Image: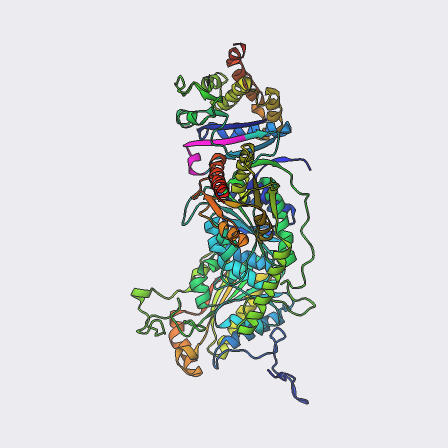
Amino acid sequence: MSAINFAPPENMEVVYERPESLAETHTHYCPGCTHGVSHRLLAEAFDELGLREKAILVASVGCSVFSYKYFDVDSCEAAHGRAPAMATGLKRVNPDAAVVTYQGDGDLASIGIAEVIHAATRGENITVIFINNAIYGMTGGQMAPTSLPGQKTNSSPFGRNVEMTGYPMRVTELLSQLDGTAYAVRRSLHDAKNIRKAKKAVLTALQTQMAGLGFSIVEMLSSCPTNWGMTPEEALDWVESEMIPYYPLGDYKVADSVANLDGGKRR
Amino acid sequence: MQEELLFAGFGGQGVMFVGQLLAYAAMDQGYEVTWIPSYGPEMRGGTAHCYVVISDKPIGSPVVRNPKVAIAFNKPSYEKYEGLVAEGGLIAYNASLIETQGERKDIDQIAVPATSLADELGNLKLANIVMLGALLTVRPVLTLDAIREALDAHIPSHRRNLLPLNLQALDKGAAVVADRLAT
Amino acid sequence: MAKEMLKGNVAIAEAALRAGLEAYFGYPITPQTELLEHLSKRMIELDRVFLQAESEVAAVNMVYGAASAGVRVMSSSSSPGVSLMQEGLSYIAGSEVPTVLVDIMRGGPGLGNILPSQGDYFQVTRSAGHGDYRPIVLAPASVQEAIDFTVMAFDLAEKYRHIVIVAADGQIGQMMEPAELPPMREVRKERPDWALTGAEGRDPNVITSIYLKGEEMEAFNLKIQEKLSEIRRSEPRWYEFQTEDLDMLVVGFGTAGRIAYTAVEMARERGMKVGLLRPQTLWPFPEERLSQLADEIESVLVVEMNAGQMLEDVRLAVGGQIPVGFYGRMGGVVPMPDEILEAIEGHYNRLTVRTVRT
């Protein structure tokens, strides 16, 4: 593979650049996929909080399986669903590190629900970035625990029948019930305004961890044009029109200690 | 020299502890020793047993089919193990709870009213130490002094106030079988 | 240091701690629970990491995380729990992070029971997760060996960046014997250069077991195989008893090997030329020594507390040169010396008959 020239052209002002915490490489994500956005948000947050040299990223199994290649930080690749357990091991012996899991809905809400619930209830000082796009991406578009009622996927070809397959799982609401959870919010990546809100949430989540306040999770409603069978634009519209009504955006748990971060001026 | 002993009784009768006490004493006297418990659900109210093997050379098997010595604290244990004692061996049993004349004549049968004697001391839980005192008097696997030293050295600190009573129980067990030595 | 009366499970826990154990993650299961309980107290007293996980699945992945940070870490479990850990073990092998696991084996299959068994021989020496690798497996037969092998496990795990499993049956976990503990070692301050600690002043480290391209995955596999070959050459350990002037060899590990020792003593007293080989490493199996002995003797009898698992390794080592007999008890039944003696006599007499005929 030929090297990519990331240097800015001469005599031009740099107004937008790659965060230091992102690696100089292309990603494998599909056109229109929002993983690129959420990666960038996390990398910017690492940079802004000066955490690049303290960060340990725990990648998971799903489309983001190679996310460890895309960040210029210490990183590893967990078994499917086990990222919060692996992160627990890493954090307990590296208490000063910023340990972050990056998990999709199949990984976190299906095979790994036990691990994330117990990490949360222990108040494990880790941050979970939860990408909810209501489908299994890597395996090619099967039903996820977060797929919407009636949603057609490659394993629910007649639309998700909730009487047969149960109901979509609202993970952030669920985890917000646990005493160990300090910060649990849902954001969306479907437009610029919401992306900026998501960025602030990632910053707060990392600050929560670094202040030792407990478990933090930022759920990001994301699009999967390829497996939804839509254009990127249609997919963003679908997030707004179909997903948000089922998964309302908002702050589900902000512990007082988190609200008081930065002298009461939360970002 | 190798001695193999089986202690058996209800959970709660101090079967495990008395086996351990003997094992500690054996270790302190410089012998090789193994202690193996039965473990698991049977410990909750059922019968429990432990094996103690004491030897002056490295011990291979810590379990034996036909132990030279068995100590039965209750009837089910007596019924289960009397038949297993090696020929020429010995079974000591808690005569307060086990009414028997003994089926086998090829082994020594030592009746010790351990529970009654412990009751006289005001603590039923000392029946195990009474049995040990009697056993070692009849068959000096180790000396009573070795047990006294082991009690002193290994009794848990929160039970230390019970040490004098334990020593009395040991003597009481020894006294009750003293006549067997004379004969 | 003087000998103390120690229960196997407690001895292993204390030995690990004294070997500089920095983090422990586990889940209660009989008959290993005293190990976890002992560490729940001692690790906290020493300001080290102890965590009771929500499952063995989580425990092994917590171990994976801490091992990726380059610290001395272990877990312990018993057979059904080790089944649950298979996934994590495979990832650990594929990431080459040093890890120690203690398996206090119990009766199976299924929920089985909590009695002593050696039914995990295949599980620990063969599968231990998907993919091509074998963990180093140490099999103690006494409380002292349990201590010594636990300490050795950490050294071997770090030397080869590999999984080391201490496989003992429930009887060794539960029994008490006088044994000597090693001196206390502090936890190591420095971390290996590959460890995940945060990339302060260096290039980032990555720990992963994924190689999408066939050629890359094969190259990694070849690297593992090379490491395993070195282990196979350097690390077999075993104990021998009465192997001079020998007609027949008894082979058994752990508790079965120890009880067989007594049976061999009894057989010698009866004039049979019988000896014992007790493998202390189940993988690497002491195949070379066994093969040497097979050249000199008439037959082998394998004794196990399972349906004949190590038996396959013995047959491979012997290579059809001489007959291999088997005596096993299953389901948590511990064989008594006299029944092993009977098996020895039966096997030995057939041997005599055959020798006379030829």
Q: Is residue C38 above or below residue C233?
A: above
Percent x, y for residue A116? 48, 60
Q: Nearer the viewer, residue C167 or A36?
A: C167
Percent x, y for residue A28? 52, 78
Q: Residue at x 35, y 65 (%)?
A: A167
Q: Is residue B106 left or right of residue A89?
A: left
Res B32 seen here? yes
* Residue C281 falls inside the magenta stretch: no
Where does the magenta region start and end?
Answer: B40-52
Task: Count the marks.
Answer: 0
Q: Nearer the viewer, residue A19 or C253?
A: C253
Q: Is residue C118 above or below residue C267?
A: below
Res C14 seen here? no
Q: Residue at x 47, y 36 (%)?
A: C342
Q: Nearer the viewer, residue C78 or C25?
A: C78
Q: Nearer the viewer, residue A205 or C61?
A: C61
* Residue B49 falls inside the magenta stretch: yes
Q: Is residue B155 above or below residue A127?
A: above
Quadrant including the N terminus of chain C: top right
Q: Quadrant of residue C98?
A: bottom right
Q: Is residue A214 above or below residue C215?
A: above
